């Protein structure tokens, strides 16, 4: 068995055995196989896909590369949620505190941004001194005491996926249903939750582009959940326009805090839906009953206080989080109605401003980002400010940047 024959086999669209996948991916993890060779295999997977059995096998290989958290000592049903990636998707920072404040424990392992899509870990790291690298002991302790914990992959938790994840981001191999499924589900299984909700984002601003792919992903994730005795539920949501009005790490954290204080917006609506589903499943109550609990938790500020408790428990200093950037504006060049905000172009613009990175040499500017000032359906006058841009880079706005907004 050798890596070249495995690459060639997948390039021909043939199915790889468990042993071949194990040889290639574990060899890459042990550095017996070079980055460029693994990049070739990943690209062959992007082009030719993988079967469900291959995807299940790769998930298992990822899981076995590290430890699996056993949360049974908590003595309660543990929930988790994950988004497949989008623009302005800050639901974790809203849902986690809501769920915990309603008495349901949520354990989450998150990742960094992938391509133009934002990552929860990047958002959390934008909070000064916030610790995303928790040991297993810290993870369990925070889960018990706070009720919501969110950590990055540690060296002992699905480390193979973390290495492959970074290479995918640097090699243009992010958009592959099997690779996305294996990456997400390995982290979800390894982190030990009983009930897992996956929010599958679909559209030009997501890794998943079509409803057909989203339905396939949903089926496969549920099947993997069954193999590991986990309850997996999915929702499919639109990502042709940004989920929230803020795109960029600190801007998104600030918006999540406003939503937890009761601000009504699309982020509020989506978070309400996810939190209600999780609470209803964990407590075995109706969704309507769960929704009432969620609204009460927000109105009473219990959810917001739980967010602050969560940040303190992971050493974050929210009071020291400041936006330090120069400001630019995108203005309308015409009168009309705002009929669309292109999520993909907004994500690319945020990347250009410094809110993300395209390789490991770059650093994220946590203050960089975009604040949308108009919503779809609004009447627009010429010269109205459509968005405020925050950046510490010297950039010149192009026609492409302005065309993020569709006005008719």
Image (cartoon, grey):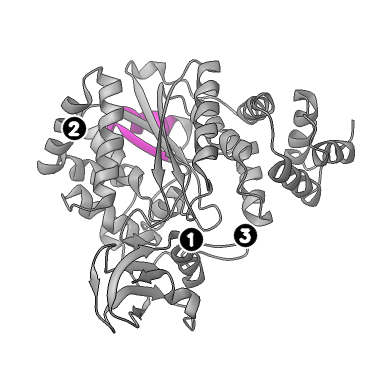
Residue 239: assigned label: none
Residue 167, position as x, y percentages in the image:
67, 50
Q: In the rendered structure, which segment of residues is drawn in magenta?
A: 137-150
N-term-proximal mark, 3 vs 2: 2
User: Does residue 55 lie above or below 332 as drawn?
Assistant: above
Q: Using the image, determine if residue 72 lies above or below residue 138.
A: above
* Closer-to-camera residue (183/345): 345
Residue 298: x %, y % from top left: 15, 42
Mark number displayed over residue 291: 2
User: Which residue ends up furthest to the left in the rendered image?
Assistant: 300
Q: Which residue is mark 3?
A: 360
Instruction: Compare marks 1 and 3 and give the one earlier in the sequence.
Output: 1
Label 3: state its secondary structure. Answer: loop
* Residue 291 occupies quadrant: top left
- The alpha-carbon separation of the residues under discs 1 and 2 comes to 32 Å
- Image quarter where the C terminus lies is bottom left
- Residue 35: x and y in percent read 76, 50
- Callout 2 environment at 10 Å: few (<14), some (14 to 19), or many (20+)? some
Taking the image as shown, residue 240 lies to the left or right of residue 142, namely right
Sequence-first tag of 1 and 2: 2
Residue 187: tell me if it is visible: no
SS at badge 2:
helix
Nearest to the observer: residue 271 or residue 30: 271
Q: CA distance from mark 3 to mark 2?
A: 41 Å
C-alpha span from label 1 to label 3:
22 Å
């Amino acid at each position: 068995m050798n890596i070249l024959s495995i690459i060639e086999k997948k390039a021909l669209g043939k199915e790889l055995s468990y042993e071949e996948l194990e040889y290639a991916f574990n060899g890459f993890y042990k550095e017996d196989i070079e980055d460029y060779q693994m990049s070739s295999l990943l690209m062959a997977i992007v082009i030719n896909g993988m079967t469900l059995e291959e995807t299940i096998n790769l998930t298992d290989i990822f899981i076995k590369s590290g430890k699996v958290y056993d949360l049974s000592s908590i003595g309660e049903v543990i929930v988790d949620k994950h988004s497949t990636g989008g623009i302005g998707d800050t639901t974790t920072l809203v849902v986690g505190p809501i769920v915990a404040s309603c008495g349901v424990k949520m354990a989450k392992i998150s990742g960094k941004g992938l391509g133009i899509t934002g990552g929860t870990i990047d958002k959390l790291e934008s909070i000064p001194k916030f610790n995303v690298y928790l040991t297993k002991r810290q993870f369990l302790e925070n889960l018990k005491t706070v009720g919501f914990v969110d950590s990055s992959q540690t060296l002992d938790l699905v480390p193979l996926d973390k290495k492959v994840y970074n290479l995918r981001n640097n090699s243009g191999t992010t958009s592959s249903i099997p690779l996305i499924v294996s990456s997400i589900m390995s982290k979800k299984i390894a982190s030990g939750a009983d009930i897992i909700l996956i929010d599958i984002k679909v559209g030009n601003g997501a890794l998943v582009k079509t409803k057909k792919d989203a339905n396939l992903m949903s089926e496969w994730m549920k099947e993997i959940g069954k193999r590991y005795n986990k309850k997996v539920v999915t929702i499919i949501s639109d990502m042709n326009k940004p989920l929230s009005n803020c795109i960029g790490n600190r801007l998104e954290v600030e918006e999540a805090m406003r939503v937890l204080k009761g601000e009504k917006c699309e982020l509020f609506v989506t978070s309400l839906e996810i939190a209600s589903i999780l609470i209803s499943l964990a407590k075995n109550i109706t969704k309507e009953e769960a929704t009432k609990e969620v609204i009460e938790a927000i109105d009473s500020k219990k959810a917001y206080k739980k967010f602050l408790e969560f940040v303190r428990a992971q050493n974050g200093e929210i009071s020291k989080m400041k936006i330090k950037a120069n400001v630019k504006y995108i203005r309308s060049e015409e009168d009309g109605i705002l009929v669309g905000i292109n999520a993909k172009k907004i994500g690319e613009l945020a990347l250009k401003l410094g809110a993300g990175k395209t390789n490991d040499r770059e650093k994220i500017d946590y203050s960089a980002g975009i604040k949308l000032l108009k919503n779809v359906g609004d009447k627009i006058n010429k010269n109205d400010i459509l968005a405020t841009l925050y950046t510490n880079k010297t950039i010149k706005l192009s026609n492409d940047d302005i065309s993020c907004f569709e006005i008719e």
